[in-house]
Image (cartoon, rainbow, N blue to C red):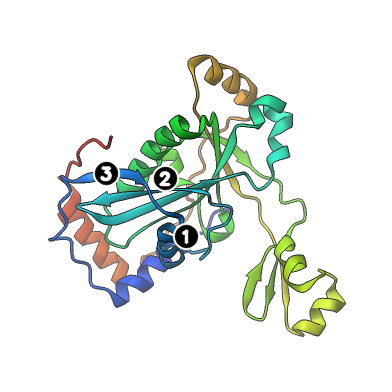
Amino acid sequence: MTTAMCQQYLVKTQILGKEPVDLTSVDTSEVKVVPIDWKEARKFITTYEWAGNMGTSKHCFGLFIADRLASVVCYGPPVAPTRYASILGKELSKSVMQLCRGASTHWAPKWAPSKLVSHSLKILRRAQRTNIVVAYADAQAGEIGTIYQACNAFYLGETSSGGGKRYIIKGHSYDPRKVVKKFGSRARGHLLRIDPSYKEIPIKPKHRYVFVLGSKKERKEILGRIKPLISEYPKRKTLVAMPPVYETARVIYEQEWRFSKPLSVP
């Protein structure tokens, strides 16, 4: 089951409440996708991405509209690299990368994220010889992978949660590895001494997508291996009314961007 509104929407809603939407000064005839510095990406991601951190990000790209940074996407090594060896084989699994983080400003046009992902994948392929990029949509955050679907990624169903948990300690969320690294142990008694009101939240399965890159021969081999796993795209089952401030922004988007046709990004 999917949540009606994703956390990314809520982040934008909060920002919209503080910053008026001004699209009149944005020239959509000037669009470019380029690599950006990790620090620049981090500043953007911690502002606009609901997770608020960079994860395993290593290679970062930005979509600029008239020299204004509208969207950012980051790639890095997969969190569980050995997980794909059984699916792809030892050699192919070595070239797997993960789309770790991605976000857009509250004023970015609707086509910006998919444009950025599509073109950054081409750059990543040329620069890193990457054949496969995996991406996850967090159902617990209300995500279904709308952008990945727009980019024609293959959907491989949901992951197995494996009984995993997230830990809320002193108001901050941690995955199991970070708990051990920061606090020394995940033992209940140990964590209760640190924060008597800490919580353990079961991790729900995530939606899993794959972008297949590489040469024609490589793509054929990869597709042959993942074919049994390919499933229909998940859809959002329930809808709720958007908060008033975001609904206002949506109307502005439609008025300003409906007939805008961006130039092809190199």
Whether residue 120 is situated above or below residue 49 in the rendered picture: above
Instruction: Tell me if 218 is positioned left or right of 80 in this view.
Output: left
The x, y position of residue 230, in whole percent, is: 58, 30
The x, y position of residue 10, in whole percent, is: 42, 67
Of the two numbered discs 2 and 3 in the rendering, the one whose residue sits closer to the viewer: 3
Of the two numbered discs 1 and 2 in the rendering, the one whose residue sits closer to the viewer: 2
Could you say which quadrant of the image residue 93 lies in? Answer: top right
Closer to us: 65 or 141: 65
What's the residue type where badge 2 is placed? Answer: Ile
What's the residue type where badge 3 is placed? Answer: Lys
Whether residue 227 is situated above or below residue 170 in the rendered picture: above
Q: In this orientation, does residue 89 appear?
A: no
Q: Residue at x 60, y 18 (%)?
A: 221
Q: Are marks 3 and 1 in contact (CB under 8 Å)?
A: no
Closer to us: 73 or 156: 73
At numbered mark 2, what does the secondary structure look like: helix, strand or loop? helix
What residue does disc 3 label?
A: 32
What's the residue type where badge 1 is placed? Answer: Cys
What residue does disc 1 label?
A: 6
Q: Are marks 2 and 3 in contact (CB under 8 Å)?
A: no
Crowding at mark 2 (Cα within 10 Å: few <14, some 14-19, many 20+): some
Residue 147, numbered label: 2
Instruction: Tell me if 168 is positioned left or right of 260 in this view.
Output: right
